Amino acid sequence: MRIFIANLMLAFLWALMTGEFTVGSLGVGFVFGYVLLWFIQPLIGKSVYFAKMIQIISFLIFFIKELIVANLRVAWHVVTPSSFFKPGIVAVPLEEQSDLEATLLANVLTLTPGSFSVDISADRRTLYVHVMDVDDPEETRWELKEQYEKRLLEVLR
Amino acid sequence: MPAAINEIIACVFILAGTAFSLVAAVGIVRMPDLFTRMQAAAKTGTLGVGCTILAVAIYYADPGVATLAALVILFLFLTNPIAAHMIARAGYFAGVPIWEHTVVDELKGQYDKQTHTLKASDGTGALSDPDASGPGPQPPASEP
């Protein structure tokens, strides 16, 4: 966290130095700050920050890609006759996780292709997900767990 | 001219945003039941509005506007799915019929109708048999 704040400060510094306080200059400053901090790692001690940052960015890219695919798929479902899909509600068993993690997982599932969180059980161990195309409930369950839960928990922990 | 490039990118995003919003609207009309409707509305609605806000940020290319737009997009992505999820949950309680071509419904019989609490699915991923719930609460989906 301390390194993240340092990185933000470096971004601000870069923006002030270049004399233009825009989104672009802040972004460039952040990237330069990141590289700089990475170089001086032996001085400040190793930190999970560098690996985490890459994980977060790759997850965001993955999420945006999935979001666009989801939208194109919905568009496809909307224009084709509704007899082409087989919806269903499947129960997805969850790992032990906090409220924040469960909320984020439910949100991510809602926005990604074919799945839509309906409710979570009172003990937070089962998430009920409405899925657009269920060929095999077991396979769907496994796919949701592997694809989204694992990735999200990797980023958050 | 850099301004022109700005405008072209903004135009593309606005067009994409309105197209997705149109898909959401048509989806609400065309989909067969509440859950499939919410699927259409939640996903395309979120990305549609997100694209439009992004277009505004790109068009004005101003840090103030961009910060505001980033916040709007952040909260949109956090709250929109929650709203959709609340509507779907409320619909399930109200007994909105689920589409007859739905393949599986593992939520059936898992709700306690008195307390509105939800049981965990029995076993790890075992398909719960709707008849096995015994004299428990009747599944709301089967009501007329």
Image (cartoon, coloured by chain):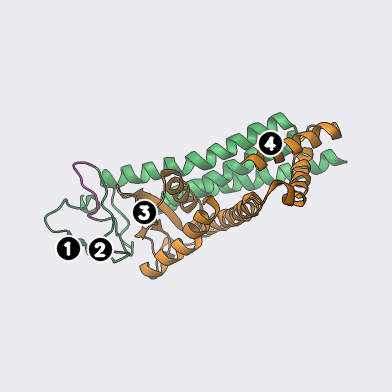
In the image: residue B76, left or right of residue A118:
right
Judging from the image, mark 1 belongs to the subunit labelled: B
Give the crowd class for mark 3: few <14, some 14-19, many >=20 residues within 10 Å. many
Gap in angstroms between the C-alphas marked 2 and 4: 48 Å
Q: Which chain shows up in orange?
A: A
Residue that lies at the very extreme toward the right in this rendered image: B1
Gap in angstroms between the C-alphas marked 2 and 1: 8 Å
Residue drawn where x is 21% and y is 47% of the image: B112
Judging from the image, mark 4 belongs to the subunit labelled: B
Gap in angstroms between the C-alphas marked 3 and 2: 14 Å
**What residue did someone put label 3 on?**
A127
Residue B104, numbered label:
none
**What residue did someone put label 4 on?**
B56
**What residue did someone put label 2 on?**
B128
Marks 2,1: beta carbons within 8 A: yes
Q: Secondary structure at mark 2?
A: loop
**What residue did someone put label 1 on?**
B132
Q: State the image coordinates of residue A43 (x, y, percent, origin top left).
A: 74, 48
Q: Secondary structure at mark 4?
A: helix
Q: State the image coordinates of residue B66 (x, y, percent, origin top left).
A: 69, 34
Q: Which residues are magenta?
A: B109-115
Q: State the image coordinates of residue A54 (x, y, percent, origin top left).
A: 65, 54
Chain B shade: green
Residue drawn where x is 42% and y is 66% of the image: A142
Q: Nearer the viewer, mark 2 or mark 4?
A: 2
Q: Residue type at mark 3: give it.
A: Leu
